Structures are given as structure tokens and as C-alpha cells.
Amino acid sequence: MASLPRPLIGLLVATLAAFGLWYVELKPSSSASGGGSQGGVGQYQSAINQAHQAVKISGAANAKLGAPTATGPAPSSPTPGKSATATKPATATATAAKAATSTKTAAKTAAKTKTAATAKTPAKTKAAKALTTAQQVSLITSAIESHKVVAVLFYNPASADDQAMAHEVGTISTHGGKVVKLAVPVSELTNFSIITQQIPVVTAPTLVLIDAGRQATTLTGYADTLEISQRVDDALAAK
């Protein structure tokens, strides 16, 4: 620890001595009358002034030496910002909520996609199960033997009128399975000899109707649903 300069030590000693003298001599006179007190203070006024002067000199000397001349209360430690502390949990909560929402949205999207894919599957399966030519021939043969009405359209898929006719045939009623209907491209005509041996097909589109009595009629060219349905009803009514 660094030692104080001698002048400063002397000032401190003088200050303490003056203060001790003032305290000893002035205290007993504090209980005396007002005149005595004034006399006591006046008696030692010069000593008190010297003490005050010594204190001022001591303060000036401390200032020159870089020592603190006054001691104040220590600054209080900074209080942690409550707003910052509160913001972090709030931010974390918001982030967690956003992540949960994103997860739920992704799950819903995946579910919708799966549902849509499932819904499309039957259509694809049905298209994949289209009858082959051999199966079509077998179906017609079975229907004739069972005395059902058969409606077979031979058409050209490249022609707009033929396509429209195929659509019309597709919309007629099967009457609870009593009517078997098919649309066959003319390129497959030779495979249906069970019909063409008895009924010549020389143009497209041609609709061949075979009633329950195995009597056949033909309708050539485009016809709407109403006309085709009427022909089918006549074939059902035949004996």
C-alpha cells in the first residue's frame, strides 16, 4: 500500500487534534446557559476554523494525488431486461406453434393427395380391365344363347360421326342386364364372324341389333339415343 505524503499526514493529525479539542471542551458547555454556550464556541472558534481549513487543504492534496475526494453509493447492478427475457419464451412459443401448424398442414396435404390418388385408382383399374376381342366375342355368343338383346356397333374410331354414334350406344339402358351392348372398331370386324356370316357389314358406322328370337336388323349411319333406344325396345318386345 502506498504511503501518504508527510504534509498530508500533518494536516490529518492537526484536523483530528482540533476536532478532539473542540469535542471535549464544547460538550460540557452544551448544558450551560445560552451565554455560556456562545462563550465556549467563541473561545474555540479559531481552532474550528483551522480544522475546516485543514479539511479543505487535505481535499485539494487528495485531488492532486488522484485519490477520491468523496465516496458515493455504489451504482446498483443493472437489472436484467424483463422485456428481453419475456421475448425469448414468446418467440420460442411462436416458433413452435408455427412448426406445429406447418406439420399439420403438411399432414393434411399428404392425406388429400393420398385420397385423390385412391379415388383415381378405380378409374385406372377399370380402364385396364377393358374387354379383349376374344372376351367380347365370348360375351356376344353367351348373350345370343341366353336370348338376350345384343347391340353391336361396328365403327371407325377416326371418324367424328362414328365416335358420336359410339357415344350414343354407350348411353342406352341395359334394362337390368337384358341388353348387351358393345362398340367394335371395323379393324376387328373379321373376328366377329358369328355376326358377319349372317349379316353383312359393308359400311361404318353400322349398328347390328339381335332380338331375343335371334332375328337381326341393322341401322346404318348416325342415329341419336332416342332412335337407338326405340330399336332396342322393339327387340326386347319381339318373341
Image (cartoon, grey):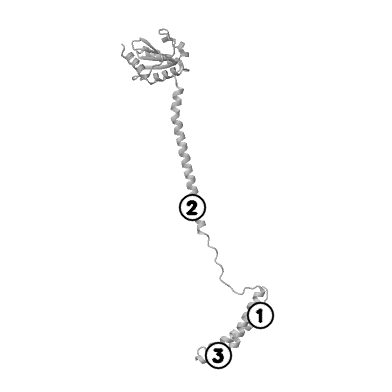
- Mark toward the viewer: 2 or 1: 2
Mark 1–mark 3 contact, CB under 8 Å?
no
> Which of pointers 1 and 3 indicates the residue nearer the eye?
3
- Residue type marked 1: Ile
Q: Which mark is residue 90?
A: 2
Identity of the residue drawn at 46% across and 13% down: 186
Residue 73 versus residue 29 in the image, above or below: above
The earlier-in-sequence mark between 1 and 3 is 1
Residue 17 visible in this rendered orientation of the protein: no
Q: Where's residue 164, x and y in %?
A: 42, 19
- Residue at disc 1, secondary structure: helix
First in sequence: mark 3 vs mark 2 = 3
Q: Quick check: 73 above or below 209?
A: below
The answer to which image quadrant residue 196 occupies is top left
Name which residue lies at 46% across and 34% down.
114
Identify the secondary structure beneath mark 2. Answer: helix
Pick whichever, 149 or 144, lies toward us: 149
Q: Which residue is tagged 1?
A: 9
In the displayed structure, would residue 54 be above or below residue 193?
A: below
Image location (x, y in percent) of residue 235: 33, 13
> What separation in Å lies between label 1 and label 3 (alpha carbons)?
29 Å
- How far apart marks 3 and 2 lie (CA) works out to 72 Å
Q: Residue at x 49, y 53 (%)?
A: 89
Residue with the mark numbered 3: 40
What's under tag 2, amino acid-wise?
Ala
Q: In screen coordinates, is 93 left or right of 3?
A: left
Identify the residue at the far top of this view: 198
